[in-house]
Amino acid sequence: MEELKAIAKNVPKEAWTQLTKTACDTFEKLIFPLTATTEGIGRLIQLRFNQLNDEQKIIAAKCLQEASEKISFPDKKPKTIIKPLVVYEALDNADNQTDETIRTLWANLLAKEFVEGSVHPEIAKKLTKITSKDAVLLLEISESESISIPIRVLKALASTWTLGLLNKGKTFNHVHLETLDLIHQIEKDWYLTTTGREFLRCVSDPQ
């Protein structure tokens, strides 16, 4: 976030004002159609969005834009009940979405919620505590269990990192994910918990 603010200082005031206005317009244009089946939800989410500072609004609008691009509704969209708490978590944690990988996971999670209404707020809370390296470790553990979870962004990231975390025993990342109840250890091997599987389902690429 500090890096973003540093960049912002070099942007002319008029241009920054226009960027913020565009972000607000984009957010409103996207959120109200998605919440149209649940009266009042869109307004509640808009109020939360308005509480963000300008930098956060720009990031949050970008995340929502990416989420909307992932959505493919059937001919007759079901009346999905969107949980504001899930969207609030995404908005309140706009700062950590300066990490492109993490922003993509938020976009995937929001897309799941907008289409299915299937994301538990606790899963969204866990995403607020995850780093890219944590997420790649979760993916590695899932693949060691032969669980096929489509998360292209993590696969691409893992291919550029030489992690080998599964061969290092118990790292801080393992301890952190274990504390979040996303993984557990049986003898010397690591496995996803039920919560871990649900987490990966929620942040996976929409089908």
Image (cartoon, grey):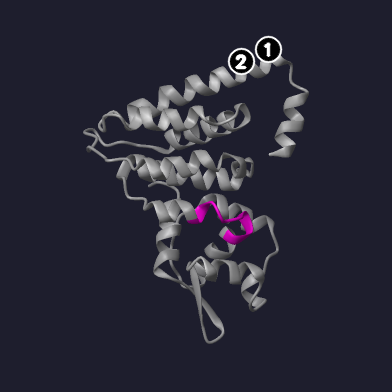
Neighbours of disc 2 within 10 Å: few (<14), some (14-19), many (20+)? few
Q: For residue 167, which numbered disc appears in the image?
A: none
Give coordinates of residue 163: x percent, y percent: 68, 65
- Report the magenta residues as a range: 126-134
Q: Which residue is drawn at the image coordinates 63% and 16% (left, top)?
A: 17
Neighbours of disc 1 within 10 Å: few (<14), some (14-19), many (20+)? few
Q: Is residue 140 magenta?
A: no
* Element type where label 2 sits in the image: helix
Q: Give left or right: position of 99 versus 84.
A: right
Residue at the extreme top of the image, as rendered: 14
Q: Residues at badges 1 and 2 in contact (C-beta under 8 Å)?
A: yes
Position of 136 relative to 40 (above/below):
below
Q: Is residue 127 magenta?
A: yes
Give coordinates of residue 32: x percent, y percent: 36, 26
Q: Give left or right: position of 32 versus 2.
A: left
Q: Which residue is drawn at the image coordinates 56% and 49% (left, top)?
A: 153
Q: Give left or right: position of 11 versus 186.
A: right
| Type of amino acid under label 2 | Gln
For the N terminus, the image quarter is top right
Q: Which residue is drawn at the image coordinates 50% and 75% (left, top)?
A: 184
Position of 33 relative to 117 (above/below):
above
Position of 3 relative to 12 (above/below):
below
| Type of amino acid under label 1 | Glu
Q: CA distance from mark 1 to mark 2?
A: 6 Å
Residue topped by disc 1: 14
Give coordinates of residue 41: x percent, y percent: 33, 33
Residue topped by disc 2: 18
* Element type where label 1 sits in the image: helix
Give coordinates of residue 53: x percent, y percent: 59, 29
Q: Give left or right: position of 163 versus 51.
A: right
Q: Which residue is drawn at the image coordinates 35% and 29% (left, top)?
A: 42
